[in-house]
Amino acid sequence: MTAASAAHPHERPLDTPADWWRQATVYQIYPRSFADANGDGIGDLRGIISRVPYLASLGIDAVWLSPFYPSALADGGYDVADYRDVDPRIGTLDEFDEMVAALHAEDIRVVVDIVPNHSSDQHEWFQAALAAGPGSPERARYIFRDGKGPGGGEPPTDWESLFGGPAWTRVPDGQWYLHLFAPEQPDFDWSNHEVRADFLHTLRFWADRGVDGFRVDVAHALTKDLTEPLPSKAQLEAIARGGDHPIWDRDEVHEIYAEWRKVFDSYSPPRTAVAEAWVERHRRPRYASPEGLGQAFEFDLLTAEFEAQAFREVVDDSLELAGISGSSSTWVLSNHDVVRHATRYGLPPLDKPVGSTESEDKQGRAWILAGAPEEALDRDLGLRRARAATLFELALPGSAYLYQGEELGLHEVGDLPDEARQDPTYFRSPGVDKGRDGCRVPLPWTTTGSSFGFGDDGAHLPQPEWFGASSVEAQDGDPASTLSLYREALRLRRSLQSAERLEWLEEFTRGDVLAFARPNGWVCVTNFGDEPAALPDGEVLLSSAPLDGDRLPGAATAWLRAS
Ligand code: BGC
């Protein structure tokens, strides 16, 4: 299919270079929590349309929308009931077209989330699978197995889902189905040709409507080897990931992405994709290769401590991987799954691990789920470091993925009442992991008023009192605000952008300080420590905190034009 034959009546493709994504700034919108135009407490497409001027004022290149599809919201929309429609609570397909046109008119591209590992249990295919019974072609689109033990009453294996609890759920006729996530998210069987064909259809459906790219959820789990006998949980965990692990990061997953690539490249400009793939470092380039999805998220900066050596190692490593894949680096500090970076950086170091994984501890999630007291959080330090880390991130070669609200310096809402929580990880832990709702609280647009300007009648997750002081209204026009810092940084980034390289300025890269230069003389210096540091010669263009005379204070970044 060509773009010409596929042209949707509302499509106005951007006249954009094919490699627009390489150093783009992509702003993630979590639609239910961005802006609510119809006053039902849930953000919607009309809300996004009404905020296009705001998005344009930020100076971003693209938005990425988390799922807005019909969903029972068992996992915030990552349980998709229909891949080719809009949730009626969020809008209509016509409004989607209107939104794309409005964003394109501002030169902002649109990336949508594709969730191929699992559907919602409300999806018509899963409902048909339940109705059709064991051995049916309907069941073959998912992963159904007979149970073990007397009457098949025990699950096929003792595997646990990523959200806690068993990974198998029994249906009334006695069979069990696999769900790596919540029970409401049955895993597809990707060896089934109908599943493959249907996703190609979905990709074309959105590409035909003018969508510029796709974010691919859990991209490393699609193909599975579930030949009998299935391994136990302990055996599964002992198998190295990569290549031939029964579930994660199997080599043949790339056959799927090679097919998808043909679809992407049949459009002009080619549609882009970015993989969410939690895989071994050396396996990442496969997802990011031009024959595959083209880009893969790197979460190493997100999981790194705010510490000079840790940041430097991540940068060197990422640039090396980009060299291998031919893609560009992808920088992320916050998203809808992790504690906001302003909060992570204000948390005390953990004396002992509390979370179930090291990465959870590093994300600060463990601290939140352990119910640490508010007094333990140094909000000012966290925000100061977050501003410094953001300027560091935005000066790096490659693309930056920002998460809604970070431009306001928002902190995590750590103390949501338990009865307000929505995240399945909270319910399935149960209650031990507080979940991800704290970074998904609807945005504050105004200092006062119902739901701080998010909508006319409340918000689906309660907003704390302090949101007003962090609102867009409170920060707009204040040169010292975090919103102004982001706007200025994104404006400068456009004008300073150059080849995807950097050179460490070793003379200034010492102890707690990192300094690097991009090829055209754009210099970035970050001080991760407490003591003021010397700056290289040059014109200071921007700093995340006021300079201390001609020195860079602690927990701060400055951009300079080398003289
Ligand atoms: C998404 C999560 C989601 C999970 C299951 C992820 O990695 O980012 O928000 O819960 O996939 O779809």
Image (tube, rainbow, N blue to C red):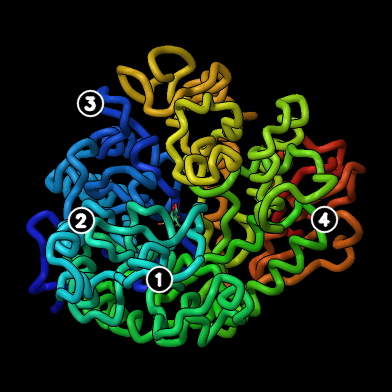
Residue in front for this viewpoint, 481 or 202: 202
Q: Residue at x 51, y 41 (%)?
A: 426
Q: Secondary structure at mark 1?
A: loop
Q: Nearer the viewer, mark 3 or mark 2?
A: 2
* 2 vs 1, front mark: 1
Which residue is the site of mark 3? 38
- Return the disc, 1 or 3, that comes first in the chain's sequence: 3
Could you give the CA–CA distance between mark 4 and mark 2, rounded to whole angstroms? 60 Å
User: Percent position (x, y) of residue 474?
Assistant: 53, 21
Q: Secondary structure under badge 3? A: loop
Name the residue that disc number 2 marks: 123
Contact between labelled residues 4 and 3, with CB atoms less than 8 Å apart: no
Identity, as a three-letter code, of the amino acid under mark 4: Asp
Dividing the image into 4 quarters, which one contains the C terminus? bottom right
**What residue did someone put label 1 on?**
148
Question: What residue is shown with label 4?
Answer: 537
The local crowd at label 2, few if under 14, some if 14 to 19, many if 20 or more residues have their Cα within 10 Å, is many
Closer to viewer: mark 4 or mark 1: 1
Q: Is label 4 in contact with label 2 (beta carbons under 8 Å)?
A: no
On screen, residue 185 above or below 452: below
The quarter of the image that holds ligand 1 is: bottom left
Mark 1 neighbour class, 10 Å CA radius: few under 14, some 14 to 19, many 20 or more: some
